[in-house]
Amino acid sequence: MTSDDQKSSGPSRDVAQASSRRVLRGSDYAVALSGTQEGDVQPMPGFILPHDESRASLLVTVRATFSALRHTQGHTVVAQAYEIGVRSLPFLCLVLAFVGGIIVYQAGIQAMRIVPDTSGIGPGYIELLVRDLAANLTGLMLATRVGASIAAEIGSMKVTDQLDALRLCQADPVSYLVAPRFLACVLVTPILTIIAGACALGSGTLVGALAFDIRPQNFLDPRFVTLGALATGFLKSLAFGFAIPLVSAHAGLYTRVGSQGVGDATTQAVVGSSIAVIVLGFFIGAVLHVLLGGA
Amino acid sequence: MALFNGALLAGLGQGLVRVVRAVGTQAMVLGAATRATAQGQCDVEELRSALLRLGLGSIPVVVSTAVFVGGLMVVQSAPLLSRFGAESYLGWGAGFGILREVGPVLTGLMISGRVGSNNTAELGTLTVTEQVDGLRALAIDPAGYLIAPRVWAIILTTLIGTVVSMLVALLGAAAAGLFLLHVHPLTFYNGLTSGMLTWLDVLHGLAKALAFGVVIATSSTAFGLGATGGPPGVGRAVGGSVVATAVLIFTMDALVSITSRVQ
Amino acid sequence: MISLDRVYKSFESPVLRGVSLHARAGSLLGLVGPPGAGKTVLLRAIAGLTEVDAGKIRILGREMVQADSKLRRMLQSSIGMLFQNVALFDFMTVGQNVGFPLQRRGERPADVRERVRVELDEVGLSGFEDRMPSGLSGGQRRRVGIARAAVTRPPVLLYDEPAAGLDPVTTSRAFALLRKQRDRLGSTLIVVSSDIDRLLPACDEVAVMHQGRILAQGTEREVKSLGDPVIDQFLEGRIDGPL
């Protein structure tokens, strides 16, 4: 009846459809997030985040996240894990398949150039994949995709004061938003790494067969893969799962107000997460190489 | 399980449509930039400021990443080389990887993250606050004022950044080779210049850098100008642009690698 | 009930310069002033969301400034706030938004649903429980925000522009609702509004704020009788004057 009640966006029909579609997804998501079981509301640690934003530091966010882990509810983590995992999977598999194929192709060409013996390509590729490539590439791509989305989500909530509204309702943003995403990332990253690695394996085998006539049985030879290689790859993917959500959530929590704030926070998250992946990848690889193998 | 497969396929299909649409838009952006420049409307002031902001601003990121990328290359190939006692090949191996593959791709990804997102964020903000429309109202063609300067600045930045990053990465690789594999820098240098790597390999890398630069410039511009819905919309545009650019970078990488069977 | 004593806050430049304020228990205090006066920052400071540089803020007899997390939590659970940009949670339905504060306290779902229904009724949005905030108009979102602020029947209510973007009829209903909250619940309200004509009749006292300071606080008559040119120009909405 009131004259101001015009929809603030788009044609009414589309908005209504979108709303009703969102209702199902939104409610499920919100149920998972806010939990409506009786008596499962734990008192929040409260106000782990400094109010004074000039005291913001990544260390504070990390400490806050870890102390919030105790109170995190399982279904929130599952909801986030689904979001992160399912949304990133197609993109990941595509990229890893591409890169895997290219690497085998390049390696094959070089091998033909130097010693026309292609028997080492398969085993060498598999070892590289397990130890390094799958984890590094997955980490880099997740830094881009998941980092951007975490920062954009939390950042949007910050600039629209939703984080403050949460605080006032006794729901500390770190416990409520960051901790579930953190745990979900830690859990999901190794799994995604394995799946994407399998895609790269498949495409590598294909290229080996099509371009260099390497028979799959000969290609898929894991004789070079050591326990150390497995450990390196796994540790890397775990470390990336740790670093990406922390860096991105931090960028989101301290988004600056203004139209460009969320965009800048997303940029900071992508760049920061990517650098973390590269640096961590190098250090873990170097340390494990020294400990296990050479030098 | 069937539902999961269906959802995956649908997701893939949707993704493909999005990519095709994105590529078309990017072609338009490149066309607009070229047209405006050909008509002499590329704003020189904006070009200079974009080069400073985007170009200079990306140097720290590119350099710091390149050092570790070089080290990473060594770490990655270390077991292989140790096994075959082929440490002397490190120079060639690292050089090959860095010049042809990892250098351009990783630099491309980092520049997309740093410069591309920044560009999307800026243009996105201008779009959602309707300042781009405001430009048109003042009879200033956005193509010459906004698009062309940024596109050229980003392409230039990517090219120069890739050259810098390749040099720094080689240095990083040499350092890592020294500390981890005890490969003397001279051996590394010999391996590099032994003749198995030629200027064609460098050209290969630069060609990729050019392709990536175009992709980053057009993609970030297209996403930025298409942002809707306030600050959250800007964030969404940045996220979408980074992901799309990454996919395109890898696609271009595959294309260039496969079509240039230059030995 | 709520008293501020010489509160200072700077970001890059001073925003609050020695604000002193007092709201009696069970009263409605209107906070008005030109844009940039610092009203929103002041409300956030009272709610303990922004830490101030100096001064005292006493709420319900306890000190908010530099309160430790337990005390702060206790104080904040007694405060309901409507934010300037409403700040509804995008990922929840209207019903879940309004019920969220109750849920955080561990109320039973059936009780929560009932209270949500009552509150939505009060703001004239019955049956909106399953709608998503993105599908609402600006005025509807603001009313949901009012419902969420009041759902726990807090002793302190802070409203930042409760009537922005509302048509005349809904605006009147909103201010009537505020008065009802004061009368029936005995809550203390601080209301920031640029709708001076509607706000002044509704509030017990008004505080005029300008450039980070409170120029005057008192009943409408007292404040107007001071003869301060800034206050007079602002309250009457005249174009010429010091502002």
Image (cartoon, rainbow, N blue to C red):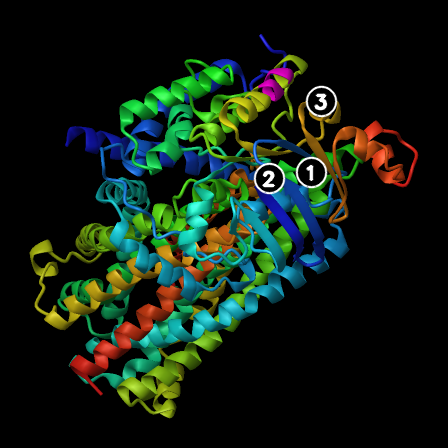
Q: Position of residue C218 (x, y in %)?
A: 74, 36
The residue at 65%/43% (across/down) is C22
The residue at 90%/41% (across/down) is C242
Real-space Cα separation, disc 3 to disc 2, in angstroms: 47 Å
Q: Which mark is residue B132?
A: 1
Q: Position of residue A187 (x, y in %)?
A: 22, 52
Pointer 2 local density, CA inside 10 Å: few below 14, some 14–19, many at least 20: many
Q: Which mark is residue C201?
A: 3
Is residue B198 in sight in this rendering?
no
Viewer-proximal residue, C233 or B18? C233
Q: Earlier in the sequence, mark 2 or mark 1?
A: 1
The residue at 69%/25% (across/down) is C199
Residue of label 2:
B225
Viewer-proximal residue, B4 or A54? A54
Q: Which residues are magenta?
A: C172-176
Read off the chain for label 3: C
Real-space Cα separation, disc 2 to disc 1, in angstroms: 8 Å
Q: How many numbered discs?
A: 3
Q: Residue furthest top?
A: A1
Q: Residue furthest right?
A: C240
Inspect the image, locate mark 2, and give the three-letter code of the amino acid beneath it.
Answer: Leu
Pointer 3 local density, CA inside 10 Å: few below 14, some 14–19, many at least 20: few
